[in-house]
Amino acid sequence: MLKQPSAGGDDGSGFTPLVVVELAPDAKEEAVVWLTRKISDSEQSGGAGLSVQQLWSGTAETEKDNPNVFLVGGSRQRLLSGAEDLGLFKEFNDGSMRAFTCANRDNFKDFKGDGDGFLSMAECQYIVKHELDSLRAKSETHIPGYEKAKLYPGKSIIRRMQSKGILVQVFPLHETEELKRLSFTWYKKVKLSLQPLDEIRHYYGEGLALYFGFLEYFTFALVPMALVGVPYYLFDWESYDKYVLFAGFNLVWCTVILEAWKRSSATMAYRWGTLSRKKAFEEPRPGFRGVLGLNPVTGREEPLYPNTKRLLRVYLVSVPFVVLCLYLSLYVMMVYFLMEGWALSLHDAEPTFWTTVLTFVPSVIYAVVIEVMNLIYRYAAEFLTGWENHRLESSYQNHLSIYLHFNFFNCFASLFYIAFVMQDMVMLRQSLATLLITSQILNQVMEAFLPYWLQRRRNKKMMRRARKRASPPPAEMPLADQVRLEADMSTYLGTFDDYLELFLLFGYVSLFSCVYPLAAVLVVLNNVTEVYSDAFKMCHVFKRPFSEPAANIGVWQLAFEAMSVIAVVTNCALIGMSPQVKSYFPESETQLILWTAAIEHGLLALKLILTFVIPDVPKHIQTKLARLEFESLEALKKKVRARSTNK
Amino acid sequence: MLKQPSAGGDDGSGFTPLVVVELAPDAKEEAVVWLTRKISDSEQSGGAGLSVQQLWSGTAETEKDNPNVFLVGGSRQRLLSGAEDLGLFKEFNDGSMRAFTCANRDNFKDFKGDGDGFLSMAECQYIVKHELDSLRAKSETHIPGYEKAKLYPGKSIIRRMQSKGILVQVFPLHETEELKRLSFTWYKKVKLSLQPLDEIRHYYGEGLALYFGFLEYFTFALVPMALVGVPYYLFDWESYDKYVLFAGFNLVWCTVILEAWKRSSATMAYRWGTLSRKKAFEEPRPGFRGVLGLNPVTGREEPLYPNTKRLLRVYLVSVPFVVLCLYLSLYVMMVYFLMEGWALSLHDAEPTFWTTVLTFVPSVIYAVVIEVMNLIYRYAAEFLTGWENHRLESSYQNHLSIYLHFNFFNCFASLFYIAFVMQDMVMLRQSLATLLITSQILNQVMEAFLPYWLQRRRNKKMMRRARKRASPPPAEMPLADQVRLEADMSTYLGTFDDYLELFLLFGYVSLFSCVYPLAAVLVVLNNVTEVYSDAFKMCHVFKRPFSEPAANIGVWQLAFEAMSVIAVVTNCALIGMSPQVKSYFPESETQLILWTAAIEHGLLALKLILTFVIPDVPKHIQTKLARLEFESLEALKKKVRARSTNK
């Protein structure tokens, strides 16, 4: 646990800056004053009860810095009561995780004296963000100075200011000292060790820690497959009978690792107290627009958007667009096959070194085109999902992840075509290898080299500034410089893209690796560097993200499981098509296909049964959860009894 | 709503008998006194706070009746506080269902004055049962008078007395007037109408009402399939191309009706207030044995049974036994095929009327044998599951329903063999028809004629008794006679067997009906009589069961869905095997099979997507549930705020 959170330094008055609120440089004075008063007003009078300070208030900077940058913090007592409001889970004296309550504070582990250092800085920032988000309009009809920025009772002020561009951004500050320590244990140490997941959680919250936990787990889970794959490469085991063995292993392994992950994720989420945390009531997402009406759930006046309109948008615009994309994707694939055929014919006519190289060119071009299309499609999907105007963030995220089917199709269409229509195993292997290697190289460039380059450029800029000030750069950066630096950093948009990348890699390994066993090796290598590049980008490229409580990897668990079901089908089909298996049924192809189909159905049923039989939460954690529930039931009963006795 | 519950009549002192507790006739005096004192002691001194009366206390019966029969009731105040304890859901003033609390009692609909008639008699009986079950030993080490009936702190007294045979039975009393009214609206009315589900729920509780609701829904859902099936019989549509159409319709329909049932069941459960009811903490089931130890969840001393031992029993005894049963079932099937072959050869050699009849004999015998085996297996499964010593009733029920796979296998093995190994569609149709009709006749005999006969016999006995007393039988039966009559009735063992029957019928319709479209018609006819026979047996054959809150049909939803998945596979295969479809692929059987497999996979995927896309709970109920949750969250927040302001 941290001691008193300190971000870049206390300014002497006991105020610890936690979150930066940046308003537009040309924001009207009255709006700025109104917002800061709202933030600092007491809760009884409708404010957030937090402390707020202007960044440049004292220091007279010569540069044209934005004057409307504010630092927000909160008193210890305010943050603790905010933690109770949010139902934050903390470690109890008996080692279990319980929702924090101020009344019960002394029974929590690490709560000493007046609670100094009890909440981590990430938790404090999360609380501040929640309090800022729940600053609601009362009788105001619009934001002072902005006639067009309408408000209605209960509307979140911060969200309205953000959607009108008055508020530029709200972000939590990094802790420089803590970050140095974290990045050292995380990726700067030379010796091989596991990631410090608890510390990552402590600094970035559960959502991100679960991503890194999954990345690590996934890498280790692939090691056995990589080890089994290596001899295929070393000894040039080209015979298909060995591939059959590999495919069988592959199938069982995929199911086992996904089931085991659920348990391991539940263990982590229990340790972090998010497993039994109840979901808070969800607010409409910032981008949601609609006509004012009565919300049937809350009874408050709030914008409403008819579901039928949304469904029309989904089925009349989004779905046709996706179909169009699929068609385009198929068209590009066909062009690729034409190019491939042309290159091969050229090579056959005149086999030189250069024509051999030429045969690889179409694959590489195709791989690059796929990556570009994925990227374009990613933005299009985000735009469309936004335009569909989902009320809740969770519904938005679910629809966004449905569009990832296109990415899946885009990446794997050509492989499916080669495998099952052309039935050319040699070409399948070659194509798989090219796709995998190219996309890995592209991703590494985008995720490691680009950030590194950006970082160096920024460092140089800072050096130049320091030189301008004509004083030797101090050992510790002043707070103003830190805020300026972090405000310029890019914003981390969430774990979606990172999970998507892992998902596609998992697809390459599980769907077709029985024809290219080296795939697992490549993915393991990629993941190891991925850990480093992701860690680096989190620590030095992006603004610190607000911590997000999470109990599991959400929709991605489903996506990975769906992939492993498809893997059963493809692997069975590949095995059925292998010459070795075909030789068992020399007289009748029909028999072969029937057997393949029967075995496939058996395997699918087995997978289903395994999913049911293996409990998702380990026994000892189930017991602990049941114990907590039993205790709260008993407490409730006692209360009821006491009340009826008193009467 | 009922007025003041009255079962056979009030005895003048304001005591309403609710539940009968029958101890063994030779039970030791001290144990009887101890138990009745426990029941009537106040809650503060560890009793149940209920009223108890001996049935024969006043009336001097000449016959050798069991003297240890007690009637248990409770004061209105006691029952209301019991309802609060149990978290019973009642209708609130605004029409929503909320957990009843005494503090808030005046805001509940139908709560007038001192709450007379607020709780239905079934609810009162459920409360009394719960209070009796939670009578726990404190310092007693054994039941007085029974050295061997050990007790330990926290052990349920009733359960120990029951397992030691000191307590014979505990059952709720029927309400004669109410029952007459219910049975009139339920099955005695001549005009066609829906079942009075709300009244059934009012009298028998949610669990049973959901069964009858499902039975009704299932019958109506099959009507379209029956209607489509009739012309096949009338016009003798023997061509397979029409069967293909039927199979396609079948597939879609199965999926749709199961999804729609979930929504309709959620609607009912919401109306009855069980949808949002939280599960109470589960006690060990009465038959559970083990060595005393500390329960890790409750921290109480309680018998524990190691899970490894249970798993050993499951995998070393139960699973081998099931495999043995499957083998036996296969063996019987083979004998059936031998008999069938022998009968056919006899018919071919000398085709007379009697040999034609003879060809049906093996099928009928086989059908009867299957029913007998199902019955034997049912008891074996119950014995084995009991012997596996499951701690919780829910785990016991889950394991019991796993064994129903044998019943499934037993019923359908021969049909699968005929369809996919022998590929004889004519024999499949004949066999299906024989199995279906025979099993329906047998079931109707067991469920309608047998109960009717038992009922007549009992009535005669009562008449003889009344004549013995040499007085004209009174218009209303005295309470003592009613209790005696009901104590002799058989005990209803729960809905398991009833659901199992529906499950097997659903299997006949969904798996193979494309070769015998009349199946749906037969099942609809069967279900209509089933409603009447089930209603009759609930009202007049069995003791009144304790009401059981339920929010859905539990594991059976899963079982029916699994069946509909298997139906996709069998129907696709049957379609693929039809001559009409085969004629599309004259040159290559391989192509045909590949297409069939592809379409089957597509249909399975579609089914899966449908299951995800259709919300299980209708939108308007989701909104209402969300509203309740939002209100309780708001209330909690206010409480927290108020507390922090007070400080």
Image (tube, coloured by chain):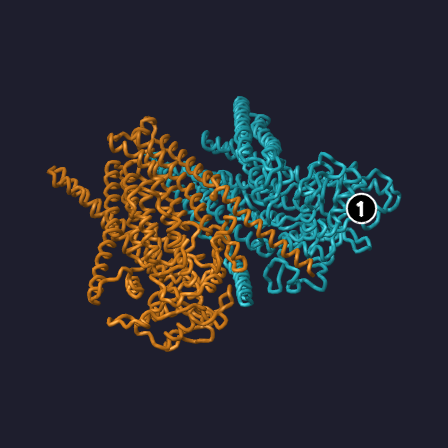
Chain colours: A cyan, B orange
Q: Nearer the viewer, residue B441 or B332?
A: B441
Q: Residue B52 in the image: x percent, y percent?
A: 39, 69
Q: Could you tell me if residue B486 is visible in this image?
A: yes
- Using the rendered view, name the quadrant where residue A384 is placed: top right
The residue located at (47%, 64%) in the rendering is B77
Chain on which label 1 sits? A
Secondary structure type for disc 1: strand
Q: Residue B622 in the image: x percent, y percent?
A: 51, 44
A479 sits to left or right of A633: right
Tag count:
1
B336 sits to left or right of A273: left
- Residue that badge 1 annotates: A54
A471 sits to left or right of A220: right
Kindly give the residue lying farthest to the right in the view shown. A470
Q: Residue B38 in the image: x percent, y percent?
A: 43, 72
- Using the rendered view, name the quadrant where residue B423 is placed: top left
Q: Nearer the viewer, residue A147 or A223?
A: A147
The residue located at (72%, 50%) in the rendering is A45
Going by the numbered disc 1, the residue's amino acid type is: Gln
Q: Nearer the viewer, residue B247 or B213?
A: B213
Q: Quadrant of the C terminus of chain B?
A: bottom right
User: Can you say whether B114 is above or below B256 in the image?
Assistant: below
A111 sits to left or right of A644: right
Q: Residue B22 in the image: x percent, y percent?
A: 33, 68
The residue located at (69%, 49%) in the rendering is A131
User: Can you say whether A126 is above or below B346 in the image?
Assistant: below
Q: Residues within 10 Å of mark 1 (few under 14, many from 20)?
A: some
Q: Could you tell me if residue A501 is visible in this image?
A: no
